[in-house]
């Protein structure tokens, strides 16, 4: 997964810059490429891969722990089984997001900077604006909400399909 994230970093850079700057992103990225070369499209690649890698271990650990800790569903109670899976998925997603958020904030700041900056400069810029806490919490609430919804749906569908295949 992490290697894939590095490969698609130019698309991620464009998407993220478009989200922040709108149509001006094309001009901004074009100017950065002219000035510093095509490698600027890979700004954030290391953080992208690292966040994916760092986030996956807590996700699987938390999901597996929750599935062992939560009471098993009574035989034949599909709704309970699916709710249990949703709770495990949401818990895993929240833990993963909290652990990897600072890395993602650095990636986004670096990718969307109008000029080429390094990770150290990105961190200094964030800390100057929002303090150290901003490095860890910027965008976290929205990320947790969207990923929790996505994780609960994924976990429910996954367990439902798994149950149907084992039946």
Image: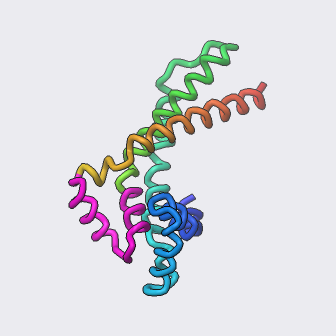
Quadrant of the snapshot with the N terminus = bottom right
Using residue 5 as the reference point, say whether residue 127 is left or right of it: left
| Magenta stretch: includes residue 120 | yes
Residue situated in front as seen by the camera: 42 or 3 = 42
**Which residue range is magenta in the image?**
103-132
Percent coordinates x, y for residue 22 in the rendering: 50, 62
Query: Vertical placement of 129 versus 57: above or below?
Result: below
Using residue 81 as the reference point, say whether residue 123 is left or right of it: left
Percent coordinates x, y for residue 76 in the rendering: 70, 14
Q: Quadrant of residue 35?
A: bottom left
Residue occupying the point 28% across, 70% down: 121
Query: Vertical placement of 139 versus 36: above or below?
Result: above
Residue occupying the point 45% across, 80% down: 32
Residue occupying the point 76% across, 28% down: 164
Query: Vertical placement of 122 versus 33: above or below?
Result: above
Q: Residue furthest front?
A: 23
Magenta stretch, main secondary structure, is helix
Percent coordinates x, y for residue 90 in the rendering: 49, 33
Residue occupying the point 43% across, 42% down: 142
Query: Vertical placement of 133 versus 39: above or below?
Result: above
Using residue 137 as the reference point, say whether residue 146 is left or right of it: right
């Amino acid at each position: 997964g992490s290697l894939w994230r590095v490969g698609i970093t130019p698309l991620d850079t464009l998407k993220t810059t478009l989200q922040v700057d709108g149509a001006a992103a094309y001009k901004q990225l074009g100017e950065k490429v002219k000035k510093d070369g095509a490698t600027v499209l890979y700004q954030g690649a290391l953080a992208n891969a690292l966040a994916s890698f760092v986030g996956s271990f807590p996700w699987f650990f938390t999901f597996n722990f929750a599935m062992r800790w939560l009471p098993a569903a009574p035989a034949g109670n599909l709704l309970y089984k699916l709710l249990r899976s949703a709770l495990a998925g949401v818990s895993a997603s929240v833990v993963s997001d909290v652990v990897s958020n600072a890395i993602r904030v650095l990636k986004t700041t670096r990718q969307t900077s109008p000029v080429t900056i390094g990770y150290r400069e990105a961190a200094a810029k964030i800390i100057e604006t929002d303090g150290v806490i901003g490095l860890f919490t910027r965008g976290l609430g929205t990320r947790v909400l969207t990923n929790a919804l996505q994780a609960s749906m994924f976990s429910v569908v996954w367990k439902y399909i798994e149950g149907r295949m084992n039946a």
